[in-house]
Amino acid sequence: MQYNAYMDLCEIDSTSSPPALRIPERFNAAHDLLDRNLRAGRAAKIAYIDDAGSYTYGDLAARVNRFANALHAFGLALEQRVLLCLQDGIDFPTAFLGAIKAGIVPIPVNTMLSAADYAYMLHDSRAQMAVISQQLLPQFQPILGQSPFLKHVLIAGSAAPPPGMRTLGEVLAASADACEPAPTSRDEPCFWLYSSGSTGAPKGAVHVHSSLIETAALYAQATLGLKESDVMLSAAKLFFAYGLGNSLTFPLAVGGTAVLMAERATPAAIGARLRLHRPTVFSGVPTLYASLLASEQLPSAQELSLRLCNSAGEALPEDIARRWRERTGVDIVDGIGSTEMLHIFISNRPDRIRYGTLGLPVPGFEPSAEALGKPWKSTSRNPMTENARPAVRDQKVNWSSISRNMDNALYCARVGVGDWAIATLLRPQGKPRALPSPENPVAKAISSSN
């Protein structure tokens, strides 16, 4: 299927804070991330390095186009869903971006779930197709016939597929490598991410086409300062919102390079890639930073090329952050995000770090806090940080820096360039607490992440 209408890219003015984004009404997220690199002359630059080899931006664009064309050949229509259960490697961005370019909605799912979880997600999403890494197929085989909506199954891998299935490789080989983007708009569904299900059945968070470039402009570029020369390595896998930004949205938005690995992010696996590929940016989680510090696999400072590290997912202990800086010479930029908000919305800055705090709102996000049942009372003793001075205003508290040590507080964030909003109820050490009534209108916006 071919579409002939020319589609503009997002324009980003970084001279203001927050950056000013001009996202055209007719907008396709995959086209935007890929074409901005091709227009900038990066077709021959390495976009991805995985366990099998390296791939240029030109290679990636061709693979994405082939998959988009294949989806049309299978008869999938605009906004129908494709479930992706893929290990980290070039097949993930190929299928994820290919679906988006075709106007199909990809749903990346956790690769470590049970057959029952996958059966639920296939039925809940009404996915017409599933693309599955061959190593994960045993988890799916008992349940593939249970969904009345699933019509096609593609297997990513070199082994011969079971009867009735095809390999992703053969489908790509049979498709053309040129494809016009589907006529999508900036505010229509682009992809889903399922929540962890810690408060019940997993829930699909629907993100729109503008979401990817917004997180890249506001957090990756304006907050972290990522750039074209960066090589990025993420411990979080691509199916996580945190990993999706670290290894797909952010490197493609700035024209950088991402290193992908299919295996678990153990100290040995991370240490080997820090030595081999010499990434300049490493995105981890506190538990892994602690494990690396306790392991002989952590390279010496002289073996590293790191200029920036960041963290999310759980509270970063001050001791771990200080020891990491002593061992590597690099600070860890800590922040908080959620699946529903897609990425980090409150964060420290590389040049303004205060360990033990979340830092400041990411430019473009509007934070507020309110007590449950009654407004905050001003106190002479500062309960946040030494420079943060809350003031009651319309039963809300605004502050300049947020600590994890507040109790009974509802932290809200609204993205300034869109209509998304999410609230997270935090206890000390970032443990979530339920609201009194699930029917409370605010309770419905509560994030299950910490």
Image (tube, rainbow, N blue to C red):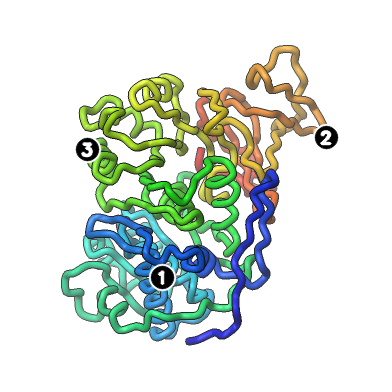
Amino acid under disc 3: Ala
* Residue 379: x %, y % from top left: 75, 16
Q: Is residue 145 above or below residue 262?
A: below
Q: State if disc 1 and disc 3 touch (CB < 8 Å).
A: no
Mark pair 1, 2: CA separation: 50 Å
Q: Residue furthest right?
A: 394
* Residue 265: x %, y % from top left: 29, 42
Q: Is residue 115 left or right of residue 445?
A: left
Closer to the chain start, of discs 3 and 1, is 1
SS for callout 1? helix
Instruction: Name the front one of labels 1 and 2.
Output: 1
Q: Is residue 113 above or below residue 39?
A: above
Q: Which residue is mark 3?
A: 268
Instruction: Name the front one of labels 3 and 2.
Output: 3
Q: Which residue is mark 1?
A: 61
Instruction: Name the front one of labels 3 and 1.
Output: 1
Mark pair 3, 1: CA separation: 32 Å
Residue 88 image-quadrant placement = bottom left
Q: Which residue is mark 2?
A: 394
Amino acid under disc 2: Asp
